[in-house]
Image (cartoon, helix red, strand yellow):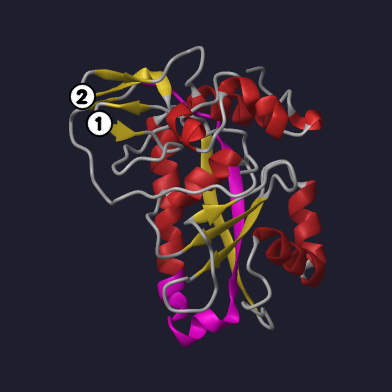
Amino acid sequence: MKFMSILALFYSLHTFASELELPTCEMENKLVTPITFFAPESLREEYEDSAVKFVIEGMVSKSNEILDNSCIPMQRELKEIIYVSGFDTEIFQDIYAAGNYIDYYYEDKVSQIQRSHSEFYGLVVSTTYSDFELEYCGATDVSANDRFFVVDMHCPKMVLEHELGHLAWAMHDMDTLAEQGLSLYELDDVVPFYDRDKAKSYAFAYQCGGKGTVMSYAEDYIPVYSSPDIKHNGVVCGDPDFANNAKVLRDYALERLGEKP
């Protein structure tokens, strides 16, 4: 399986209580990351526009909860929702074809997003009530396009931040990599040579106290990035040497804010 090409997560919607110990931090200056969502026109046959917006706003809100919990100076914002006509779901079954379609027909908007240092755009689809086939809840390819993602609106809210985390070079947990037939030492074989400096050795997710951090594959999750400064059920949720995705995202934000990480 090509690493970072098709990225998945399967999470159940479980909440957390006081067993989550979070660090204290001050974040006066935050990187704002506006997100433009594209949606197939066919969604309007199933849902009111207000319902689609409600789902997307819930995803954005969950992203901001995860970022705040992890002491990451970043804020996600919904910029706009654009309905795409003529989007043939029988043809555009992968992120590359979908992205190319949007890039072609919305060239001006995409160019503006790409020129920005902090904007993202993505395709939100419904795989439950349509023939659009998305193998997993979300997909990205950070080496091909570090601004574009696809998410299924019927998946857990944290799927958005999972995919945006990939676009900042946050990675899955090592157990998941092992299941995919990869190891820490083999990442150079699947990450393009021109991007290898971006794949940090500490950019892995973690499972702690029976639940996984946002980039993990786990049945239950906690709304945080892996970090040695966070605990769940008394278990540390990261390691400074190999599981500190909070630092990955924090450095990503600080660099774009013009502050030295």
- Which residue carries the number 1 mark? 210
- The residue at the point 40 percent across, 59 percent down is 155
Task: Residue 75: give its label.
Answer: none
The magenta region covers 24-52
Image-quadrant location for residue 123: bottom right
User: Disc 1, disc 2: CB below 8 Å?
Assistant: yes
Q: Position of residue 114 (x, y in %)?
A: 77, 50
Which amino acid type is shown beneath numbered disc 2? Asn
Location of residue 167 with respect to 78 vertically, above or below? above
Q: Nearer the viewer, residue 135 or 112?
A: 135
Task: Residue 233: give its label.
Answer: 2
- The residue at the point 81 percent across, 64 percent down is 108
Task: Check the picture and name the quadrant holding the C terminus.
Answer: top right
Count the labels in the image.
2
Q: Nearer the viewer, mark 1 or mark 2?
A: 1
**Disc 2 on helix, strand or loop?**
loop
Mark 2: few/some/many CA within 10 Å (<14, 14-19, 20+): some
Image check: 73 left or right of 89?
left
Q: Earlier in the sequence, mark 1 or mark 2?
A: 1
Image check: 194 left or right of 9?
right
- The residue at the point 48 percent across, 13 percent down is 240
Location of residue 114 with respect to 170 vertically, above or below? below
